[in-house]
Amino acid sequence: MICSEEFIGRTIEVIEARNKALFGLRGQIIDETRNTLKILTKTNEEKTLLKQGTLLNFGADNLLGDTILCKPEDRIKIRN
């Protein structure tokens, strides 16, 4: 399942977010913390997204950011 995979290097798109300006934002994940994902957009801008309250599209999969609110190293250890 996608929750236990490494996210850095994957391309995502914001489907829903509390911040309406983030809708449709697309980019490659370049960093992840407990509460955020940092992406690099097509225009080479770095954007930091809060995981909480954000619905993300990972290609074929949609994922609610609330389900991955933990340190990446702890999330990867979890087996689904």
Image (cartoon, rainbow, N blue to C red):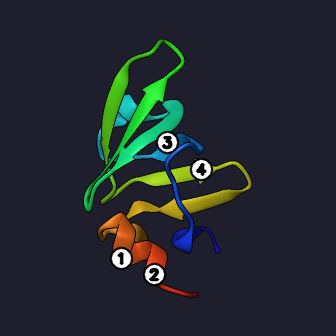
Which residue was labeled with disc 2?
77
Residue 68 relative to residue 35: left or right: right
> Which numbered dot is residue 74?
1
On residue 57, the disc is 4
Query: Disc 4 or disc 1, which is closer to the eye?
Result: 1
Which label number is shown at residue 14?
3
- 42 with respect to 23 (left or right): right
Whole-percent x and y of residue 30?
43, 38
Measure how far apart labels 4 and 2 are at the Cα level: 22 Å
The image quadrant that residue 71 belongs to is: bottom left
Secondary structure under tag 3 reads: strand
Q: Nearer the viewer, residue 16 or 67?
A: 67
Of the residues shown, which amino acid type is indicated by label 4? Asn
Amino acid residing under circle 3: Val
**Which comes before the other along the chain, label 4 or label 1?**
4
Characterize the local packing of mark 3: few (<14), some (14-19) or many (20 or more) Cα atoms within 10 angstroms. some
Mark 1 Cα shell of 10 Å, populated few (<14), some (14-19), many (≥20): few
Quarter of the image for the C terminus: give it.
Answer: bottom right
Q: Nearer the viewer, residue 32 or 59?
A: 32
Q: Residue at x 59, y 50 (%)?
A: 57
Residue placed most toward the observer, 9 or 55: 9
